[in-house]
Amino acid sequence: MCRFVFALNCLLALLYPVTASAWGYQGHKVVGSIADKLLKPNAKEQVRQILGPNLDLRRVAPWADCVRSVVRHDNGTYEYVANPEHLDYEVPCTPFKSDAERAAMVDYVSRNWTTCTYQPDPNRPPQGCLNLFHFENIAIQRDRYEQGYRGTNERDLVAAIGAAIAVLADKPPSPLFSFKDKREALFLLAHFIGDLHQPLHVGTVYLDDDGKLVDPDKANPYDPKTETAGANAIQDQNLNLHHEWDDIPTDIGEASTRELLAAARKVPASQGPMESWPAAWATESLLVARDAFAGLSFKFNPPEPPDTRRQWFVSFDDHTAYLWQADLIKRKQLARGGARLAEILNTIWP
Ligand SMILES: [Zn+2]
């Protein structure tokens, strides 16, 4: 019992005072790092040839977030601008700070900016399509990923993973994405497989002004005001709920651990053709997201002025139990992500 209490206190000490450390890079690096260790010889050699001697999956996995520093000017030009208020965003991007690498990021963004009709967050100005590649916003009432459900779109996370796989496997490229070569596709795949295993990048809640769950696929008409943008609009104390799920347990650090690697080796092989795997993994993450929203209730915080960003507050039936559960889920999902990234590459290059 004492050992249990001690472990709990340690865990809570690790979880509570977290400074923002997003799946945005630590988690992505961990997923890439697990995959680096699970590649079979041929896949490892192919990855080495594509990335060169100085990069590996761990280092390239954050790249798709590094490109968020590329801004589009009003005259239609693009530029890499490090945010002076968030120089921390640059930390995982140091392998890409040369002029050539920044030019490659600007090039990627300009090719994939295309304006989208689907805008998940009605409170924000329209964004480039490439922001959609990172997530689904499927209601947790659904029991599977299926294109056409609210929160999916033709340029969603599952579609983006499929497009990256096509480039790597020498299949016909999707016309909806512009992934110019295997290097870029590998950068993106390493990142998106991580995103797919963060449950709140797939499943979410839609809420009304009483803080009650609504079903966006059955609502007639659908009310965009019920959108929580993947729980980004749900606030806990200092962070929003989405961000709390982006954080990984701090004891893991930025690379695979022995425990995670052992768990990854036990992840069952995926069934059916490789092209069907991303949707199946999205279904799995959607069901995991149900657990991430279990035991929560929400209270609407009316915005002032009324047309500004809408927000809800979260409360927990049992906060300690919730944090325990979240910690376990995150470790399991990181292991799955690493295993699946390696599984795809080992399948493309057997
Ligand atoms: Zn992402």
Image (cartoon, grey):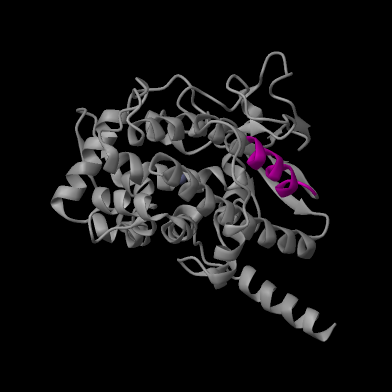
**Dominant secondary-structure state across the stretch colored magenta:** helix
Looking at the image, residue 252 sits to the left or right of residue 293; the answer is left
287 part of magenta stretch? yes
- What range of the chain is rendered magenta? 283-294
Q: Residue furthest left?
A: 99
Quadrant for residue 335, please give it: bottom right
Q: Position of residue 102 (x, y in %)?
A: 20, 48
Q: Residue furthest bottom?
A: 2
Relative to the observer, which residue lies in front, 323 or 192? 192
Q: Residue at left 27%, top 43%?
A: 183
Q: Position of residue 209 (x, y in %)?
A: 73, 33
Could you tell me if residue 168 is visible in this image?
A: yes
Q: Residue furthest top?
A: 220
280 part of magenta stretch? no
Looking at the image, residue 296 sits to the left or right of residue 240; the answer is right
Q: Residue at left 62%, top 73%?
A: 14
Relative to the observer, which residue lies in front, 206 or 30? 30
Q: Residue at left 21%, top 36%?
A: 107
Could you tell me if residue 239 is visible in this image?
A: no
Looking at the image, residue 47 sits to the left or right of residue 145; the answer is left
Q: Residue at left 71%, top 35%?
A: 140
Q: Position of residue 1 (x, y in %)?
A: 85, 82
Q: Quadrant of the C terminus?
A: top left
Relative to the observer, which residue lies in front, 79 or 67? 67
Relative to the observer, which residue lies in front, 280 or 49? 49
**Quadrant of the rendered image holding ligand 1:** top left
Looking at the image, residue 218 sits to the left or right of residue 306; the answer is right
Above or below 9: residue 111: above
Q: Position of residue 342 (x, y in %)?
A: 46, 50
